Image: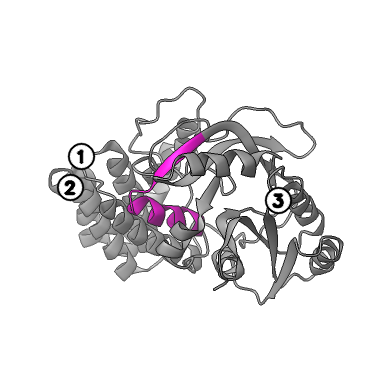
C-alpha cells in the first residue's frame, strides 16, 4: 500500500471499453480548483482503444494521471487495485461515465477539515441523460443532510458513487472491496455505515451522473434470474444484514422491515432458481430482520406451506408468477425514495421489490 501524502486527493476511475467517456471523467478531475490531486485510471482489460486513450492522458499530464492495466476483475476489485496504489489523504471513487464539478474537492476537503469527527463528506449530484443539459435537482437523497448512512441504506443506496469524498484512514479501516458482481458499492458503504461513521453534507452540486444510451457497462448485463445474479444477491443480503446489526439497526425500524421483505423476495428467487440452500439462508435472514413477532406473519406461514406442498422450486415459481400478475414490473421503491420533497424516513410498502442489488 502506498504512503499517504497529506492533503492529496486520489481519484480512482475503473473503466472498460469507454475511451471517450473516460477522457471526460479524467478531464473533470483535472479541472478541480483544489490541489494536490492524482488520478488513477484502472483499465479492466479493455478490448478497444480505451487503454490508448488513457495512455495519452498520462503523457499529457505527467505526475497527475496514472494508468493501471488489469486483467478482467469486475468493478469492486478494479477499484481495490486503484486504492492500494493511491497515495491520497482523501479517496474519491468516480465511475468512467460520470463527471465531477470543479469545486468538489475544494468544498469537501474544507468540510472534512472543519469536521474532524466526520469520515465522509458528500454533496449534491445532478442526473442527466446524454444530449440533455443537466438540471440542478439533487439526485436520490444527495440534497439531504443525513448524519449517517443507516438506517436509510436499508431502503436504497441513497447517494451516487462520486457524491462522497472519503478519508483515506476510513477506507483503510474497512478493508478491501468485496468480489460481489453487483451492488459492491452498496455493500462497501454499508461497511462504513456499520462503524457509525458520521457524515458532513455540502449543499453545493459536486458532480453529474450521466445516462448514456448504448454505452457498455463495466458490470455484465446478465439476466436478473440467472444463477450468477441470484447467488450474488444472496451474498449481498447476508452482508447487508450483518452490517445493519453492527450499526445498531433493530427489527422495529421501518427500514429494517422493508429490508426483511426484500430478502424474503430473495428467498423466493433462490427457490425458483433451484438454489434451496441459498433460499433457506435468505428466509432465515428475512426472519431475523423482521423480528420474532413479524416473522410469524401470514407471508412466512403461507410460504412454508407452499414449500411443504409443492416443493421449494415450484413454490418459488408460483410466487414469481403471482408477483407478475399482482403488480407491474419496475422498482417502485426507487421512485418513492428518490422523490423530491420526500421525508428522509420513507414509508415503504410490502410489495415493492426495491432497488436492484
- Report the Cα–Cα distance between label 2 and label 3: 41 Å
Q: Secondary structure at mark 2?
A: helix
**Residue 260 image offset from top left, x and y in percent:** 29, 48
The percent coordinates of residue 248 (x first, y second) are 24, 48
| Apparent side of residue 158 relative to residue 318 in the rendered image (left or right) | right
The total number of labels drawn is: 3
The residue identified by callout 3 is: 97
Q: Are marks 2 and 3 in contact (CB under 8 Å)?
A: no
Circle 1 residue = 252
Q: Nearer the viewer, residue 268 or 325?
A: 268
| Front one among 115 and 286 | 115
Residue span colored magenta: 184-201
Which badge, 1 or 3, is on the more N-terminal residue? 3
- According to the image, label 2 marks what residue? 291
Q: Residue at x 69, y 59 (%)?
A: 38
Position of 247 relative to 110 (above/below): below
Residue 228 lies left or right of residue 41; in this view the side is: left
The chief SS type of the magenta part is helix
Amino acid at each position: 500500500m502506498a504512503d499517504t501524502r497529506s492533503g492529496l486527493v486520489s481519484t480512482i476511475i475503473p473503466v472498460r471499453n469507454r475511451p471517450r467517456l473516460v477522457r471526460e471523467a479524467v478531464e473533470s478531475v483535472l479541472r478541480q480548483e483544489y490541489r494536490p490531486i492524482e488520478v488513477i485510471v484502472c483499465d479492466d482489460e479493455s478490448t478497444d482503444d480505451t487503454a490508448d486513450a488513457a495512455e495519452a492522458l498520462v503523457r499529457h499530464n505527467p505526475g497527475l494521471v496514472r494508468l493501471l492495466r488489469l486483467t478482467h476483475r469486475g468493478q469492486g476489485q478494479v477499484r481495490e487495485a486503484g486504492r492500494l496504489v493511491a497515495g491520497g489523504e482523501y479517496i474519491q471513487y468516480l465511475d468512467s461515465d460520470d463527471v465531477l464539478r470543479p469545486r468538489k474537492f475544494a468544498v469537501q476537503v474544507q468540510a472534512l477539515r472543519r469536521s474532524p469527527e466526520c469520515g465522509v463528506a458528500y454533496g449534491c449530484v445532478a442526473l442527466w441523460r446524454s444530449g440533455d443539459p443537466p438540471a440542478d435537482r439533487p439526485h436520490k437523497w444527495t440534497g439531504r443532510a443525513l448524519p449517517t448512512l443507516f438506517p436509510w441504506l436499508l431502503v436504497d443506496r441513497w447517494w451516487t458513487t462520486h457524491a462522497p469524498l472519503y478519508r483515506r484512514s476510513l477506507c483503510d479501516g474497512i478493508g478491501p472491496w468485496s468480489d460481489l458482481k453487483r451492488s459492491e458499492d452498496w455493500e462497501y458503504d454499508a461497511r462504513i455505515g456499520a462503524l457509525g461513521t458520521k457524515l458532513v453534507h455540502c449543499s453545493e452540486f459536486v458532480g453529474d451522473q450521466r445516462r448514456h444510451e448504448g454505452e457498455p457497462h463495466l458490470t455484465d448485463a446478465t439476466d436478473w434470474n440467472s444463477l450468477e445474479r441470484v447467488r450474488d444477491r444472496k451474498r449481498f443480503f447476508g452482508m447487508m444484514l450483518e452490517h445493519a446489526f453492527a450499526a445498531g439497526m433493530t427489527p422495529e425500524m421501518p427500514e429494517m422491515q422493508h429490508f426483511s421483505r426484500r430478502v424474503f423476495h430473495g428467498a423466493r428467487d433462490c427457490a425458483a432458481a433451484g438454489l434451496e440452500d441459498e433460499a433457506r439462508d435468505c428466509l432465515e435472514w428475512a426472519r431475523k430482520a423482521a423480528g420474532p413477532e413479524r416473522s410469524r406473519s401470514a407471508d412466512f406461514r403461507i410460504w412454508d406451506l407452499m414449500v411443504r406442498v409443492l416443493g421449494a422450486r415450484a413454490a418459488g415459481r408460483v410466487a414469481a408468477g403471482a408477483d407478475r400478475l399482482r403488480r407491474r414490473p419496475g422498482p417502485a421503491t426507487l421512485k418513492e425514495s428518490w422523490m423530491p420533497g420526500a421525508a428522509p424516513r420513507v414509508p415503504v410498502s410490502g410489495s415493492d421489490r426495491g432497488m436492484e442489488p
